[in-house]
Image (cartoon, rainbow, N blue to C red):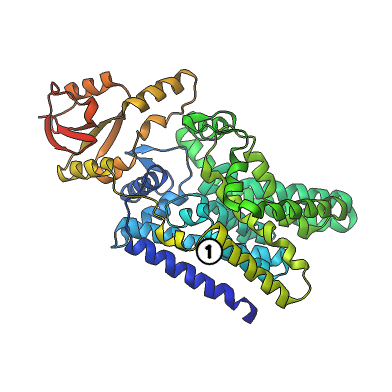
Amino acid sequence: MKKHIPLFIFLVVFLSLNIFKVGTDVRPFFDWDESIYAQVGKEMIKSKSYLVPLWQGRAWLDKPPVPSLMYGVMTLIPEQNEISMRVLTVVLSSIALTLLYIFAYRYSKSIFVSLGTIIITSFLPAYLQRSQSLNVDVFLLIGWLGYVLWYRKRWVGTFFLTFAVLSKSLLGYYPVAMIFLYELLEFLLNKKKRKKEFAIYIKNTVIQVAISSLWFFGMYYQFRDDFIQYHFVDSHFKRVTSSIEQHFGQRTFYIDLLLEQLKYGIIPVVVSTLFLSYLVIKKKSTEAFFSIIFVPWFLFLNLTKTKIAWYLYPVLPQFVYLALYMIRFIKKPMVQGLVLVVVLWSFFTFMIPITSYITTDFSKLEDHQQIALEAKKEQCKLLIVLVNESTRSSYATLKSVDLVIHTTTWWGNHPSMAYYSDAKTSFDYMTSQFKDDINKLPVKTCFISENQDWMSGWQLKEVASNKTFTLGIRE
């Protein structure tokens, strides 16, 4: 136990630094993800809809409930939501780092590889940003790592698999598929010795998958074909086969992101990956297989058409681990430690200066949030927002080539406007629709548009404005 003391020291430092930062440098929820999960979570708790995510009172069938629900629970704490919800993410990120340490130590047998993996991972820009903001990816990472570590333990494996699936849906099953292929191959190569063990594995896996799938059956029972369309066709199939909602990128999009994060560290990654792949193919090494279990996911990402930067997040720790893996072959522990010190010094000096942790901010109060807060002051119950001209034009183009899904128009330019206005908010994507809403919706309805779109002829009382937006109320 004593040899793992550096892990506990680092976790205390990580927690302290990040909680201090999110607690003292309070920033508004940014668009998109943060404000969406904050609003959905708040609505779930308020409506006691614990299994169905809600946005503006409507069932949001794209995503499973766990992340939003857990963020929603944080609204019950008598603390500013921007602090309490982000503190939850910090805690979850620490749990993920702990599981990553266990994973790295189990398959490298090296304290120095394990410790270096979590230190470097925690300060990579992508991981650091996700450690201080609301997101679902940290939930997926916890579920994946926990399942890989304890899939043979029926109920522990069930917990982590369910956690992953109810956080990121079908993506949560990735380690199940990879481990099944490995276990099947092991069984086929040695049927006599592995027959009983394989039967137990299959039984446990069937139970784990069955329990983790219950939410899907419940949602289908309640929403029928809408759930199939919105959750599977729109949110999964379209994201793989199409660059929906302007998420375009080159074929090398994720490779470029990885190079940006690891820089020259990619060289030992390639060497370790090739070496471990050789051990898997030639030696049938279990350790080698699990050491590269998430690499195929990265390869799959490069085949998908929708390019979103944070999709890389769950596999970043895999590549940090591979970058440090060769340290384990140094025989003397003291030399291993010296090599790690040099690596960490190089990392914080040339790749990620430690000062960037202090100076980097991920959001700031902007005009759209300020005008939304003005709408909250006016106690608007219904808020209609006209998206800007650029978004109206791009939406029309995307719609014409079927690169939108049913929730595309739910968010507007700035979904954080819904959260900060504390009003039921809808976004109009046509000026004509906005004019119709002004004429037909009840009095006291609030309307927001950019100043360049605002018309004095509208039957609205202007009550607030800033350099970008105007807020009016229908009298």
Q: Quadrant of the C terminus?
A: top left
Q: Is residue 450 above or below residue 136?
A: above
Question: Measured from the top left, where is residue 305 in percent x and y?
Answer: 58, 32
> Does the rendering let one see residue 151?
no
Q: Is residue 49 above or below residue 455?
A: below
For image coordinates 23% across by 27% down, the residue present is 452
Question: Measured from the top left, where is residue 113 in percent x and y?
Answer: 67, 66
Residue kind at label 1, given as amino acid type: Ile
For image coordinates 62% across by 68% down, the residue present is 115
Question: Measured from the top left, where is residue 230 in percent x and y?
Answer: 48, 32
Q: Secondary structure at mark 1?
A: helix
Q: Nearer the viewer, residue 317 or 440?
A: 317
Q: Quadrant of the N terminus?
A: bottom right
For image coordinates 38% across by 67% down, the residue present is 20
> Does the rendering let one see residue 90?
yes
Q: Which residue is mark 1?
A: 95
Q: Nearer the viewer, residue 249 or 103?
A: 249
